[in-house]
Image (cartoon, rainbow, N blue to C red):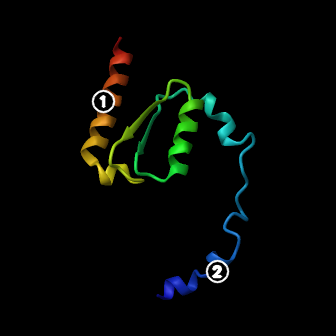
């Protein structure tokens, strides 16, 4: 309880006051990503998150998107087997492309 009281000021002050956004904005640089990119989203996540993933997928070249049925925001916790299978398949594909 004491820790919460000692840090209460964080909730009333502007939490972004020391943050300086990068220029150009990160979103404007998504097309520069060259690393293999896998975006995983649960179909039960909030609509804003799903739209964000769709938008990132549209801007990152050659990115892969996986929609996990029945998963919420924390896909690896709500559907761990599907999450692991998806990640392992993505990594396997990347390894095969490197070896080819």
Front residue (pair 25, 81): 81
Look at the picture and state if 61 lies above or below 57: above
Q: In the displayed image of the protein, which residue is found farthest to the left? A: 81
Front residue (pair 51, 77): 51
* Percent of width and height locating residue 44: 40, 51
The local secondary structure at tag 2 comes to helix
- Determine the residue positioned at 50% across, 24% down: 62
Q: How many marks?
A: 2
Q: Where, by quadrant of the figure, is residue 12 drawn?
A: bottom right
CA gap, disc 2 and disc 1: 46 Å
The local secondary structure at tag 1 comes to helix
Look at the picture and state if 56 lies above or below 35: below
- Determine the residue positioned at 32% across, 35% down: 86
* Percent of width and height locating residue 13: 69, 75
**Can you identify the residue that label 1 sits on?**
89
51 lies left or right of 88 = right
Look at the picture and state if 77 lies above or below 6: above
Answer with mark 2 or mark 1, whichever residue precedes in sequence.
2
* Percent of width and height locating residue 11: 62, 76
**Can you identify the residue that label 2 sits on?**
9
């Amino acid at each position: 309880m004491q820790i919460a009281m000692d840090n209460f000021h964080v909730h009333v002050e502007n939490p972004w006051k020391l943050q300086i956004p990068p220029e150009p904005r990160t979103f404007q640089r998504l097309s520069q990503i060259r690393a293999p990119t896998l975006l995983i989203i649960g179909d039960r996540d909030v609509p804003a998150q799903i739209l964000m993933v769709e938008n990132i997928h549209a801007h990152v070249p050659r990115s892969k998107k996986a929609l996990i049925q029945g998963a919420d925001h924390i896909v690896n916790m709500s559907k761990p087997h599907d999450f692991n299978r998806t990640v392992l398949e993505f990594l396997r594909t990347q390894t095969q492309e490197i070896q080819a």
